[in-house]
Each structure stands twice: as structure tokens, then as C-alpha cells.
Amino acid sequence: MSMLAYSDGPPPTRRMIGLGVAVGVHALLIWALMSGLARDVIEAVQEPLEVALIAEPPVPAPTAPPPPETVKPKEAYVPPPKVKLTPPPVAPQNTIRQVQMAKPEVVPVVREPAPAIPQAIPVQGNTQPPYPPASRRNGEEGRVGLLLYVSETGKVTDGKVESSSGFERLDKVALIHARRKWTFKPAILDGRPAGHWMKYSVIFKLTD
């Protein structure tokens, strides 16, 4: 019986070739390091990277939605109050006839008598005021109404023209003459002399 020799590893020739390739690669790396190739590779790796930023178009701002329409609430309907009108009571016909037949009573108006006003009495010697010569020449005549105050002594202490004759000259002469020249018996009130106002008239006529 014959026996065959068996080996697990590669043939010696292939092992030598692989060893040679490995030595060659190491030698190449050493040479590259020595010649600066590795430095160029490292610098190329360390160079800054340029990054270009592309600006995106602006996004339009969202528009606010329109405000909601306000709906005015309807006013509450308040019905008007019901007013019940009550007609006035109708009087019987008999009552109406009685009212028509009745006559209103006439109340007589009682007037109180006016209090007696005491009067002064002119005394004798009161003369007519002199006729102004200028009034005679100009044809002036008329009636002068005087309002005189006769004191308790009977003298005229005050006075005024109540109604004019139409001529100032005649009015003035009549008033001055009455205040200076006339005297009266004073009026008697409750048994004592009393002063009072009295009316008196003076008439001027060209025939006098």
C-alpha cells in the first residue's frame, strides 16, 4: 500500500511571490514618505472645503384672515302695553233732564260803599289866575286841570298839572297862582283836620 504526502500551505513558489509583493509595497510607502508624496496627500485633505449656500426664495408672510362679520343682534320685541279704555258711565236720561231744568243760582254781588273822602272847601278870596298878556296877544285859551295837596292847615303845599290846556304858559301860571294864593278849609277826618289831594280846574277865556 502506497502512502501520499499531503501539505496544507501554499507551494513554496507562491509564498515567495507574496512575500516579495509585500516587501515591495512597504518599500513604495517608505519612498513616498521620503519624497513628500504623503505630505501632498495630507495637505490636499486638510484644504478647506468651499460650501456654496443657495438662498431659498422668501416665503410670503401669511395674510391675516379678514375679521368675522359682526351680526347686530335683533332688538327684542316688546309688545306695547294693552290699555283698556273704560268709557265714562252714561247718566240716565232722567238725570240729564233734571240737570237741564235746574237753573244756576245767581249770587248777587255786594259792593262795599266807597269810603267817604273828605273834601277841602275853597274859602272866599281865592282869585282867578291872571291872564298872561302874551297868551292874550297870541289868542291862547283852554282848561288846566290841577291836582293840589291841601294840608291840614288849609294851605296848598304841593301840586302838579294833571291835564294841560295845550299851552305851557297857561299851565304854569295856573299852578303857580294856586300854590301861592289859594287857601282852603281843611278836610275833617274822624273829627280832626287832615290833608289830602284834590282836583281843581282853571279855565282861561279871552272873553274874560
Image: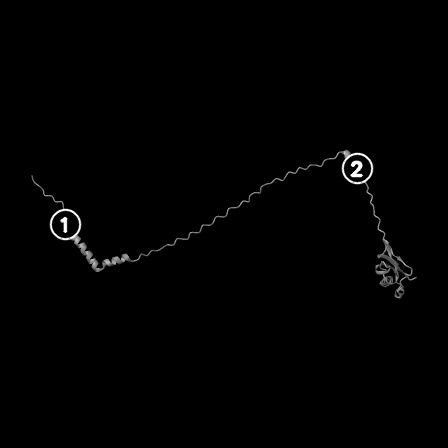
Q: Are marks 1 and 2 in contact (CB under 8 Å)?
A: no
Residue type (three-letter) at the residue carrying disc 2? Gln
Tell me: 86 left or right of 4: right
Out of 201 and 1, give the one closest to the viewer.
201
Above or below, 71 relative to 140 = above
- Extreme residue in the left direction: 1
Within 10 Å of the Cα at label 2, are there few (<14), some (14-19), or many (20+) other Cα atoms? Answer: few
Query: With 165 as the anchor, is 27 left or right in this view?
Result: left
Residue at x 19% of width, y 57% of height: 30
Point 25% across, 57% down: residue = 42
- Residue identified by numbered label 1: 15
Q: Which is closer to the viewer, label 1 or label 2?
A: 2
| Label placed on residue 105 | none
Quadrant location, the N terminus: top left
The residue that label 2 is drawn on is 100
The furthest residue to the front:
191
Lower sequence index among marks 1 and 2: 1
Which image quarter: residue 98? top right
Rendering coords of residue 104 (x, y %):
80, 40
Quarter of the image where one finds residue 124: bottom right
Q: Residue at x 15, y 52 (%)?
A: 19
What is the x, y in percent for residue 188?
86, 55
- In the image, residue 162 lies at what x, y percent? 84, 58
Say few, some or many: other residues with alpha carbon within 10 Å of mark 1 (under 14 / 14 to 19 / 20 or more).
few
Q: Secondary structure at mark 1?
A: helix
Q: Depth check: 131 or 38 in front? A: 131
Quarter of the image where the C terminus is located: bottom right
